[in-house]
Amino acid sequence: MYLCNKMTKKFFKILAKLNKIILPSYTKQRLDLSKASKFQMAIFGWKLYVTKNALD
């Protein structure tokens, strides 16, 4: 069980680094979330999910 959690965490850390390189940063762009498109919200949610799992 411990090995599986360690591998999962490592996977999410790698995925977080890829997200940082590939996907845009809406916080740096000062995007207003109330005016964001559904696609922008999906990217924001995905990055939030990956970051949360990488930090656990």
Image: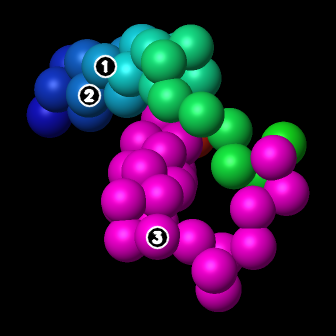
The image's mark for residue 40 is none
| Quadrant assignment, res 50 | top left
* Residue at 84 percent of width and 43 percent of height: 28
Q: Residue 39 placed where, x, y %?
A: 36, 59
Give the secondary structure at mark 3: loop
Q: Residues within 10 Å of mark 2 (few under 14, many from 20)?
A: some
* Residue at 48 percent of width and 45 percent of height: 47
Q: Is residue 44 placed above or below 51 in the rendered structure?
A: below
Q: Viewed as shown, does residue 6 lie left or right of 33?
A: left
Quick one: which residue is furthest to the bottom in this view? Answer: 34
Q: Viewed as shown, does residue 20 lie left or right of 46?
A: right
Which amino acid does the dot numbered 2 rest on? Answer: Thr
Name the front one of labels 1 and 3. 3
**What residue is shown with label 3?**
37
Of labels 2 and 3, earlier in sequence is 2
Give the secondary structure at mark 2: helix
Q: Residues within 10 Å of mark 3 (few under 14, many from 20)?
A: few
State the CA–CA distance, disc 2 to disc 3.
30 Å
Find out whether the residues at labels 2 and 3 contact each other: C-beta distance under 8 Å.
no
Which amino acid does the dot numbered 1 rest on? Answer: Phe
The image's mark for residue 11 is 1
**What residue is shown with label 2?**
8
Q: Is residue 1 placed above or below 21 in the rendered structure?
A: below
What segment carries the magenta color? 29-54
Judging depth in this view, the residue of 4 and 28 nearest the camera is 28
Asked if residue 37 is among those painted magenta in the image, a careful observer would answer yes
* Residue at 14 percent of width and 34 percent of height: 1
Find out whether the residues at labels 2 and 1 contact each other: C-beta distance under 8 Å.
yes
